[in-house]
Image: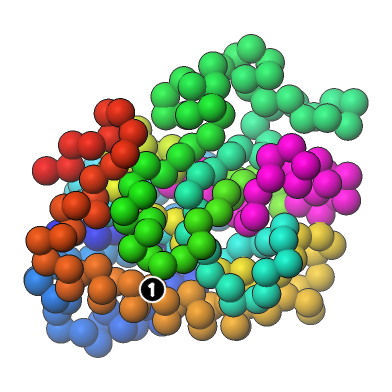
Amino acid sequence: MYILLASATAPEIQPLCSFLERSSFLPGGHETSVVTTGVGSLAATYSLTHSLIARRPDLVIMAGIAGCFTDKRAGDLVVVGEEVLGDLGVWEDRQFRTLTDLGLQAGDSPPFSNGLLVNPYSKLLGFTGLERVRGVTVNEISTDPDRIRWLQQNMRPVVESMEGAALHYTCLQQNIAFLQIRSVSNAIGIRDKARWNIGTALDTLNSTLIDLLTRLTGTGGEMQSLLHGDLPGKNDHS
């Protein structure tokens, strides 16, 4: 099995990369490679697409830190079950209208499901042992109180990133199994890095990734079952 590991910036998964460099092999002879996508959905979409075309993986794992809309603490880990686009549309009269609201895209236009980019690999999500949450992808970090309140009330995300939707969209389009794992580094709000705890977030993220990768590659014949999706058209992973 070939696993592609992705992060927006290299430091986010550097401890995992160091672990892989020290390990002469993974259980079962599985292979891995790493791509640093760059920050933002445009860079992530290009980098992921380029990597998938160069060599099609059996599984893509994107990992990184994230801001949080709820009361989770720094270092808490989640797996994103569904993504919503937080700024693709128009903001007017203190309300946000999506492409669906504007009549420019049907809510169930593939790969969307009711306006969401849903990860259909429920067994794989469950295997992580992490809480499954909704993520929102934005191209401008949310700091405005009115905007934050609107996102919370109308899109109901738990974590925010700038690349998550790129992973979901690209892998759903290419019918490739994927996981998005996020470690909370800060609460969504005024951008005050003195109140962030990136060190703790990265420590728990990488220790969890190492454990997950070790468990995944040690499952043997169970892997194909984990890579079997649950939505129509997402089940051919030979």
Give the residues in magenta: 142-167
**Residue at 81% in and 70% down:** 192
Give the answer, above or below, for where 18 lies relative to 215: below
Q: Amino acid at mark 1?
A: Leu
The residue carrying mark 1 is 209
Q: Nearer the viewer, residue 81 or 19?
A: 81
Question: Which x, y percent locates residue 171?
Answer: 35, 42
Residue furthest toward the top? 103
Which residue sits at x=64%, y=12%? 103
Residue 14 in the image: above or below residue 188 = below
Location of residue 97 (image quadrant): top right
Who's the residue at 59% across and 83% down the image?
200
Observer able to see residue 146 = yes
Q: Quadrant location of the N terminus? A: bottom left
Q: Secondary structure at mark 1?
A: helix
In this rendering, is residue 135 above or below 182?
A: above
In this rendering, the answer to whether 131 lies above or below 114 is below
Q: Nearer the viewer, residue 77 or 34?
A: 77
Please state, as top left, top right, bottom left or bottom right, where the C terminus lies in the image.
top left
Residue 69 lies left or right of residue 3; in this view the side is right
Give residue 178's position: percent from left, percent from top.
34, 51
Quarter location, residue 217: bottom left
